[in-house]
Amino acid sequence: MALSGKLTKKLVENFGPGRHGDGNGLYLVVDPSGARRWIVRVVVKGQKNKKGAPVRTDFGLGGADIVPLNQARVRALEYRRMAKQGLNPRFNARREIPTFQEIAQQVHIDRMPTWKNAKHGQQWINTLRDYAFPKIGRMPVDSIGQPEVLMCLGPIWTEKHETAKRLVQRIKAVLDVAKSKGFRDGENPVTAI
């Protein structure tokens, strides 16, 4: 299956509202508001509707402002291959792994009701913001290991030991939540520190 189609970067940027095909089931959908997104239409092998006909399904691949044309073609090819094998891309596509900062911010929001006061909650996220986010905040949460954690702790371990101990606890909590949501495997790297 070819990764080149009818669309070009210039066409993607200039098309008016509608559904514009690239070939092989990949479409650029332009809303009347001007928003642009990619979809791929596939037929999952073995799936039939009530009348026994194959079921065509559209899957979103992301906004055209974030996902460039070449990447949309690669994702569309991946989805078509899954469908050809009888796998539904909705359940079998690789999930986007969130960053450490994204998970940390969600943990902060989820735990707000458990803190004694608002100041404690603010200190919790501020410690991560000041010492972890600059070093590992943008990293996918599944790629953080012991060296990355130590990178955060090293500069403050002797000068601000109490802060470092709190930082260890908070990083551990974030990585534990990431594992519970299926974004990490294995032992938490903080456990051995």
Image (cartoon, grey):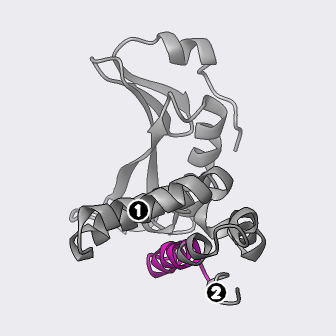
Residue type beneath disc 1 = Gln
Residue 170 part of the magenta-drawn span: yes
Does residue 137 appear to the left or right of 32 in the view shown?
A: right
The residue located at (29%, 68%) in the rendering is 110
Q: Is residue 15 visible?
A: yes
The residue located at (61%, 82%) in the rendering is 185
Residue 32, above or below 187? above
Total numbered badges shown on the rendered structure: 2
Extreme-front residue of the structure:
159
SS for callout 2: loop
The residue located at (62%, 18%) in the rendering is 9
The residue wearing badge 1 is: 123
Compare marks 2 and 1 and give the one earlier in the sequence.
1
SS for callout 1: helix
Does residue 178 appear to the left or right of 147 in the view shown?
A: left
Q: Which mark is residue 186?
A: 2
- Magenta region, residue range: 167-187
In what quadrant of the picture does the N terminus appear?
Answer: top right
